[in-house]
Amino acid sequence: MKRLKNMLERSAFGVCSYLGDKMGIASTTVRLYFIYISFVTLGSPLIFYLFAAFWLNIRKYLKSGKKLLWE
């Protein structure tokens, strides 16, 4: 069960974990604040979350050294 939880956290909550590591706080705290802010502001942080997830995936892809399609 713990392995499943870790896999799910890495894939689904990568943005919150990344932000928590960068700010030096627990990723669960970041997730809770994200959920609370989403309810208060009617979901507008979801746009930030999706943008950050996209950006982290692009960064990981570029760091891996693979050629991009348009090059």
Image: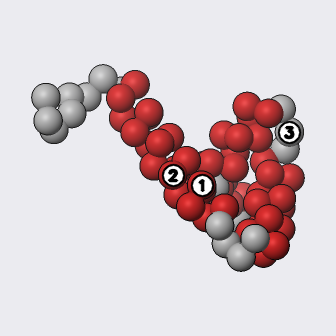
Instruction: Give the number of callouts.
Output: 3
Q: In which quarter of the image is the C terminus?
A: top left
Numbered tag placed on residue 25 in the rendering: 3
Circle nearer the viewer, 3 or 1: 1
40 displayed left or right of 50: right
The amino acid at mark 2 is Phe
Mark 2 closeness class: few <14, some 14–19, many ≥20 residues within 10 Å: few
Task: Name above or below for residue 37 compared with residue 28.
Answer: below
Find residue 31 and report its horizontal and vertical position in percent.
Answer: 77, 58
Q: Do the residues labelled 1 and 2 touch (CB within 8 Å)?
A: yes
Find residue 21 and report its horizontal and vertical position in percent.
Answer: 74, 34
Task: Name above or below for residue 19 compared with residue 28.
Answer: above
Please, what secondary structure does the residue beneath circle 2 have? helix
Task: Name above or below for residue 41 compared with residue 57.
Answer: below
| Sequence-first tag of 3 and 1 | 3
48 displayed left or right of 17: left
Image quadrant assignment for residue 44? bottom right
Q: How far apart are marks 3 and 1 (CA)?
A: 19 Å
Find residue 69 and report its horizontal and vertical position in percent.
Answer: 16, 38
| Sequence-first tag of 2 and 3 | 3
In percent of the image, x 76 and y 41: which residue is there?
A: 20
Q: Do the residues labelled 3 and 1 touch (CB within 8 Å)?
A: no
Mark 3 closeness class: few <14, some 14–19, many ≥20 residues within 10 Å: few
Q: Is residue 32 visible?
A: yes
Give the residue at mark 2: 51
Numbered tag placed on residue 48 in the rendering: 1
The amino acid at mark 1 is Phe
The amino acid at mark 3 is Ile
Circle nearer the viewer, 2 or 3: 2
